Image: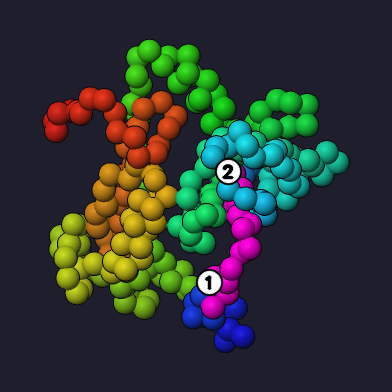
Amino acid sequence: MAGSPVVSYTENLMKYMKLDQKGAVLAEYIWIDGMNGVRSKTKTLKGPVKGPDELSEWNFDGSSTGQAPGDNSDVYIRPVAIYPDPFRLEPNILVLCETWDPDGSPNKFNYRHEAARLMEANAKHEIWFGLEQEYTLLGSDGWPYGWPKGGFPGPQGPYYCGVGTGKVYCRDVIEAHYKACLYAGINISGINAEVMPAQWEYQVGPCVGIDCKLTPPSVVLPCNA
């Protein structure tokens, strides 16, 4: 048993992660909830699949995720993309899903549906998009890693794109995330430390249309674009 409710022992977990799945595949259905957070649940498949069209629609209790009222709480999740699972490893998969209401209309928090419609309607223009996400790593006490307890770090300057002790923190987590994205086939294009200790950034893209897999565009942007 773990000694803390917020800590688990990876060594114990790994004994079970290596067990034979007897040909089964674990499919982690993932969707965005009503608070812009991530939710997921796992389905056992009898074997591998080649695309999201081979996967069944599923459902969940939308009243517990801010996506439906309690008296009509079913929300349906429809697979739209699959990726190799970097946590459970292949043949297991991550399944990205859209959310739909029982009447067959997109759930009001299903923003991907409209984005995909617009991308497809304008596909001849080969629309590109990309994103960068800045984030800060916090300990279980809510304090950023590398900050003095109850205090603040020195002024910005040495941390941005920094290298070495006292300048960057949690690089092991960042490297693990980077490799996990590449394993899953995400078109992650870079990472860097940001201006505050324990603050990092990653970039995805450029991607064509709604797809963010590792399929580079046919044209390369000039470096000053």
Marks counted in the figure total 2
Residue 35 appears at what percent x and percent y? 59, 45
Please give the residue where the numbered disc 1 appears in the rendered image: 18
Say above or below: 44 vs 120: below
In depth, the one of 154 and 77 nearer the eye is 77
As drawn, is 27 to the left or to the right of 159? Answer: right
Kindly identify the residue that appears in the image at 43 percent across and 32 percent down. 211
Q: Earlier in the sequence, mark 2 or mark 1?
A: 1
**Which image quadrant: the N terminus?**
bottom right
Q: Quadrant of residue 66?
A: top right
Q: What's the residue type where badge 2 is placed? A: Val
Say whether residue 32 is visible. no
Choose top left, top right, bottom left or bottom right for residue 176. Answer: bottom left
Q: Which residues are magenta?
A: 15-31
Instruction: Examine the structure image and report whether residue 28 is included in the region drawn in magenta.
Output: yes
Camera-side residue of 186 and 223: 186
| Residue 209 drawn above or below residue 139 | above
